[in-house]
Image (cartoon, grey):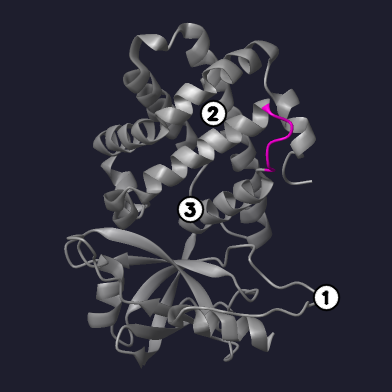
Amino acid sequence: MTLTSQSAHSALLSASSHAVVSATAPVVAQHADEITARFYSNMFTAHPELLRVFNQGNQATGEQSKALAASVVAYAVQLIDPNAPSFAHVMRRIAYKHMSLGIRAEQYTVVGHYLLEAVAEILGDAVTPEIAAAWEEVYWLFAVQLVAEEARLYQHSRVDPAQPTRPYRIVKTIDETPDIISLVLEPADDRPLPEIAPGQYVSVFVDLPDGDRQPRRYTVSSTAVGTRLQITVRRVLGKNGAPNGRVSTYLHDQAKVGEILDVSSPAGDFVLTPPIPHYSWRAPAPALRPCCRLLST
């Protein structure tokens, strides 16, 4: 078993913390977006090196903050409510994402410090020592389960968390449409292509001209040539005054054949497993190639 079962979750929380979290969960949920926004601001101010791991585009739009807020609240709810929806699939997807980014166990200490600090800052005097201790317990239950699942994924993929990527060389670019490009990549370290299940993605780390390093996740759209993988990238155009996507713009306009990109091990559990059922597929244009790979399998 890789993740704690739903029925056992409520037993993980101590009785005293269970009562406190049950009483305060609505207030924390009400302010969750503010808490996580403050958390990221404080953490990046103190640890700017972490900006190279997090998607700055999602930070700018607030998507990352909202996703974290929703995850923490949902995890807390299923700790106190045995009838809450299972959190296991969310936990697994977070673990896969963290594995693709090279998140390490020791970084959870940094995250915990600034997340709990943000709770105290936003809720102020309402956060008594008992409330602080209860939510600290929630965080560390969450963190320990993620660390364990991520360790399993690292081991299964034979990936060292200290070196989560491999160098891949761009060997071909394909202009699919005016705003969609495919990049064909092959390992540049003389090691074979890893096993990639249809539907999995890789994180691609790009060193931008201004010195920033940014990761983005792209579904593997083809492995038809057994020694190469292909990703398909839609040009992200900013809306409502937001800037265009920095990584997609770079890959469209500046990435050249022969360039080396750092690429993670394949990740993700949205895959087809035998027996293959019948599906009806609808997808936007950027997803057509990944869907074709699923269908061909």
Residue 18, compared with residue 284, is above or below; it is: above
Residue 222, compared with residue 95, is above or below; it is: below
In terms of secondary structure, where does tag 3 sit?
Answer: loop
Structural distance between the alpha carbons of marks 2 and 1: 38 Å
Which residue is the site of mark 3?
102
On screen, residue 115 versus residue 72, left or right, reads left
Which residue is the site of mark 2?
139
Q: Is residue 3 visible?
A: yes
> Along the line of sight, which residue is nearer the eye, 130 or 247?
130
Which residue does the image show at 53% across and 69% down from the upper left? 201
Residue 199 within the segment the image draws in magenta = no
> Along the line of sight, which residue is nearer the eye, 222 or 110?
222
Q: Residue furthest right?
A: 275
- The magenta stretch is 81-86
Which residue is the site of mark 1?
275
Residue 279, compared with residue 244, is above or below; it is: below
Q: Quadrant of residue 139?
A: top right
* Chief secondary structure of the magenta portion: loop
- Amino acid type assigned to the residue bearing label 1 in the image: Pro
At which x and y percent is residue 147?
59, 41
Q: Could you say which disc has been placed on residue 58 in the image? A: none
Which residue does the image show at 59% across and 30% down from the upper left? 76
- Amino acid type assigned to the residue bearing label 2 in the image: Tyr
Other residues around mark 1 within 10 Å, as few (<14) / some (14–19) / many (≥20)? few
At which x and y percent is residue 3?
72, 43
Residue 38, compared with residue 197, is above or below; it is: above
Which residue does the image show at 74% across and 46% down from the upper left? 2
